[in-house]
Image (tube, coloured by chain):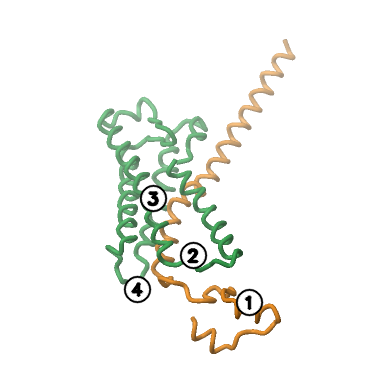
Chain colours: A orange, B green
Amino acid sequence: MYISYYFVCFSHLVNQFRLSFFALFNRMAIPFWTLGLTIMPAYLDHKMNTLPETLPDGYYGGVSTEEEEDKAAVGVEAPLEDVEAKA
Amino acid sequence: MTYALGFIGSIGFMAWSLHSYTENKPDERAAPYFKGRMFFYSSVLAVAGTVQFLLGAVVAGLFNGKELSAGPVTVAFFVVSYPGATMFVGLWEMINGFWGIARSFDILNFEMDIPIYQLSLGVQWLFILLLQDIVQLAYLPFGSMAAAAVA
């Protein structure tokens, strides 16, 4: 009888902890679930309005032409005025 | 599904952008690419808002405001304790969604000093947290519908 009583109490505690855990987990997860649907249009709208229609070479600082790849391979940086002209 | 698309898409989008950069193809991510993505995610937002608005309208019409005495109405991930709040948040999402679709076609793309569309979406998230999550769940008994509170 006492064993079954302790078992019931233990099950109750586990159940309460499970409910609290899931409640806490869901409340923590709510901002992340809803943030994606909200932030994506805002981010994409900003990018589509600020980026050019075609990206010039080296827009993100990457090496995109064979000549620049060769220079990067031997450690020679492109002249500053070339980069500014392309940007 | 729309919330899952927005959630997973926001993570996957950044990962694929980094992948494009590391593959030395950042030029694929120019303005036209973002316009196409903008159309898709705005459509998802518009669908989410429309569904939520219609759900609030149906609940308000069916139960005539008496649903609170019998407990909240749960449909999929939505918990409706107050249909008016559900309709309001859904309407705001729907407007932002269709506005975003229009902006992807260069319509209603106002030239303003303040980012009006981003501010509208920020207010939308505030309303989602307050009216869709906290207010709708606050009425519920302890933890009973917490697992369904994703939206």
Q: Are marks 1 and 2 on the same chain?
A: no
Between tags 1 and 2, which lies in front? 1
Q: Is residue B107 above or below residue B131?
A: below
Residue density around tag 3, few if under 14, some if 14–19, many if 20 or more, within 10 Å: some
Q: Of A8 and A71, which appears nearest the observer?
A: A71
The residue at which mark 4 appears reads as B113
Q: Where is residue B59 shown, x and y percent of the image?
A: 30, 32
User: Label 4, label 1: how many angstroms apart (C-alpha)?
Assistant: 40 Å
Tell me which chain the residue with mark 2 is part of: B
Whether labels 3 and 4 belong to a single chain: the reply is yes
Q: Quadrant of the C terminus of chain B?
A: top left
What residue appears at the point 58 percent right and 73 percent down from the top-left corner?
A62
- Give the vertical position of A48 relative to B99 (above or below): below
Q: Chain of mark 1?
A: A
Q: Nearer the viewer, residue B79 or B10?
A: B10
Q: Chain of mark 3?
A: B
Q: Label 3 vs label 2: CA separation?
A: 35 Å
Which residue type does callout 1 highlight? Glu
Q: Earlier in the sequence, mark 2 or mark 4?
A: 2
Q: What is the quadrant of the N terminus of chain B in the image? A: top left
- Which residue in the protein does label 2 denote? B28
- Is A11 displayed left or right of B47 in the figure? right
Quickly name the residue at label 1.
A69
Q: Are marks 3 and 4 in contact (CB under 8 Å)?
A: no
Q: Chain of mark 4?
A: B
Mark 3 to mark 1 CA distance (whole Å): 50 Å
x, y percent for residue B83: 32, 37
Residue B94, x across and y down, in percent: 32, 49
Give amino acid for label 4: Asp
Is B7 in front, or is A30?
B7
